[in-house]
Image (spheres, grey):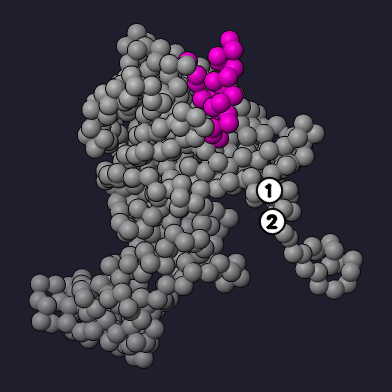
């Protein structure tokens, strides 16, 4: 557009229709994966040999080839696997360029890993849930360092799987499925247990450059987030956020956190969500991606509130004739510790900072405006041995999916979903449940519906008539959701991200369930999306052989 405007000598506007968008914007990447597992006689996976080949479309553009490396630290998922060998390749083709998608890189990783775990279970004649239990990182092992450099901050994977098993009444469910299969019904159960990375450390991008070619002093790392807080003369606190949400509720949670930290009612906190690099504090890592808000921006809010609280408490201490260490912020007031009867309104202290700063002690600044940054030291550049803690926090999701296949059309219907999530401290229960539901629907689209079709010459043939996405009609399945809480020790409130887990785990859980439903036909689902026509083709090929 800039070039067109330059040559035309006037402003130029481009209006894109939906078909043009599908032809020329971006899509999620294709990945061809090969997983090999070394397994001991007890069914424990001791090593993985992984080969990733990523179709990034017509050309590489930022942040690609990041999809190959974003989940590098959690490459072994929720399992205690000591050794990994990884080969990663990005391949340029004549397809649409690729770009960011929810759970960026995670859907592909866990499809390969969790399908492998199911295959190990089948090879050893072990129930898939029991096989995972044998391989899970124990609840006593945290913080846990993975062979690729990830540092899992907290978790209770064994407890979560136990809750999942009880919630689903797993053994009784398995027995009902055996009875249904005896009647000729196509029913299946699929399980996925995954680690959900959040607060990406951009240092992982350095892995795309071989260690011998990395330039000294040019390393990249970091997960920094900035906020700005101001207090007006009437005690109203304004919060400026640099993460622009798309419906996640950042303003709601920011208001709640600041009100809690400063002892204020919610109506005295005004959140502003905007991103103007000319006025909003930012770094190159700033943004609403990789589930950064809960672990990073919430921590920056705590840092900013701590700075503002110092000024407010000192001003309140002057009004109360007390030492600043002897007062606290409670219910919209500054009060003497242990003596609620001696207090002044928060707005009175704010007013003193604005109208009478001369009353403050000589060593106290009348600070009513602060910028704060949260920069976790755990987010470092990759080592020369290609190990990196690619995210700050690592949550957990375990999901069990019950499916039924129509005997005539082979349409996949989801009968029940049982889920257990751990995102550390829960900042807002309603919003986090919304995030889980949204991620699950996103994963459902990739598992059963969304597919870009191309001719052999690389011409896309998809339109929004046949590129299907889930609607409320497809997402009315019963969801039985539970929660485990293991606060993160590396964030100020113990919160981790939770917006992407189910988009990573749900697709492979469905694939495992469909494979289970087709068990007697010896068919493995090794691709997505999987729908009736593809199942029909697999069964036809199987029967012809």
Report the residue at 43% width, 16% height from top: 520
Of 246 and 126, nearer the camera is: 126
Q: Quadrant of residue 152?
A: top left
Tell whether 489 sits left or right of 172.
right
Q: Secondary structure at mark 2?
A: helix
Number of numbered discs on residues:
2
In reply to whether residue 526 is colored magenta, the answer given is: yes
Quadrant location, the N terminus = bottom right
Report the residue at 77% width, 39% height from top: 459
Q: Mark 2 and mark 1: span between their CA atoms? A: 8 Å
Can residue 407 be seen here? The reply is yes
Place of residue 291 in the rendered image (x, y in percent of width and height, measured from the top left):
45, 51
* Numbered disc in front, either 2 or 1: 1
Disc 2 + disc 1, Cβ < 8 Å: yes
Q: Which residue is mark 1?
A: 463
Report the residue at 23% width, 84% height from top: 345
Q: Which residue is mark 2?
A: 18
* Magenta stretch bounds: 522-545
Residue lying furthest bottom? 355
Quadrant location, the C terminus = top right
In reply to whether residue 190 is colored magenta, the answer given is: no
Tell whether 13 sits left or right of 255.
right
Of 177 and 297, nearer the camera is: 177
Of 442 and 252, nearer the camera is: 442
Dot 2 alpha-carbon crowd within 10 angstroms: few under 14, some 14 to 19, many 20 or more: few
């Amino acid at each position: 557009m800039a070039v067109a405007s330059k040559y035309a000598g006037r402003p130029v506007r481009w209006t894109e229709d939906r078909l043009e968008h599908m032809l020329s914007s971006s899509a999620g990447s294709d990945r061809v994966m090969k997983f090999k597992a070394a397994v001991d006689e007890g069914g424990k996976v001791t090593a993985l040999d992984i080969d990733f080949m990523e179709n990034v479309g017509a050309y590489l553009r930022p942040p690609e080839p990041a999809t190959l490396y974003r989940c590098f630290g959690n490459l072994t998922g929720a399992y205690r696997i000591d050794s990994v060998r990884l080969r990663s390749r990005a391949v340029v083709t004549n397809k649409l360029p690729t770009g960011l998608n929810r759970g960026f890189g995670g859907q592909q990783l866990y499809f390969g890993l969790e399908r492998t775990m199911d295959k190990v279970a089948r090879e050893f004649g072990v129930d898939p849930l029991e096989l995972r239990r044998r391989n899970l990182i124990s609840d006593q092992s945290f913080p846990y360092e993975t062979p690729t450099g990830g540092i899992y901050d907290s978790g209770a994977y064994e407890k979560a799987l136990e809750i999942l098993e009880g919630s689903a009444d797993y053994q009784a469910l398995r027995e009902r499925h055996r009875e249904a299969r005896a009647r000729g019904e196509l029913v299946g159960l699929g399980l996925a247990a995954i680690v959900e990375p959040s607060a990406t450390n951009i240092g992982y991008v350095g892995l795309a450059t071989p260690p011998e070619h990395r330039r000294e002093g040019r390393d990249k790392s970091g997960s920094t987030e900035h906020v700005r807080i101001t207090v007006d003369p009437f005690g109203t606190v304004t919060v400026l956020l640099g993460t622009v949400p798309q419906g996640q509720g950042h303003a709601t949670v920011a208001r709640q956190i600041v009100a809690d930290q400063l002892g204020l009612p919610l109506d005295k906190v005004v959140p502003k969500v905007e991103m103007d690099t000319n006025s909003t504090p930012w770094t190159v890592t700033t943004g609403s991606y990789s589930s950064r808000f809960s672990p990073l921006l919430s921590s920056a809010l705590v840092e900013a509130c701590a700075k503002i609280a110092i000024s407010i408490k000192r001003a309140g201490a002057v009004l109360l004739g007390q030492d600043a260490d002897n007062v606290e912020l409670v219910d919209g007031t500054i009060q003497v510790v242990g003596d609620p009867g001696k207090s002044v309104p928060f707005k009175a202290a704010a007013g003193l900072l604005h109208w009478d700063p001369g009353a403050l002690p000589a060593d106290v600044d009348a600070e009513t405006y602060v910028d704060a940054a949260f920069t976790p030291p755990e987010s470092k550049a990759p080592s020369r041995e290609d190990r990196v803690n690619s995210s700050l926090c690592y949550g957990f999701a375990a999901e069990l999916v019950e499916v039924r296949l129509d005997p005539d059309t082979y349409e996949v219907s989801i009968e029940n979903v049982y889920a257990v999530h751990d995102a550390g401290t829960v900042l807002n229960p309603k919003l986090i449940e919304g995030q889980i539901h949204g991620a699950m629907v996103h994963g459902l689209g990739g598992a059963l519906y969304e597919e870009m079709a191309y001719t052999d010459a690389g011409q896309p043939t998809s339109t929004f008539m046949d590129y299907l996405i889930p609607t409320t009609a497809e997402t009315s399945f019963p969801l039985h959701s539970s929660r485990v809480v293991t606060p993160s020790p590396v964030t100020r409130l113990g919160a981790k991200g939770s917006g992407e887990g189910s988009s990573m785990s749900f697709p492979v859980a469905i694939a495992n369930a469909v494979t289970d439903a087709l068990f007697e036909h010896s068919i493995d689902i090794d691709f997505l999306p999987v729908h009736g026509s593809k199942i029909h083709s697999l069964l036809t090929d199987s029967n012809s052989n």
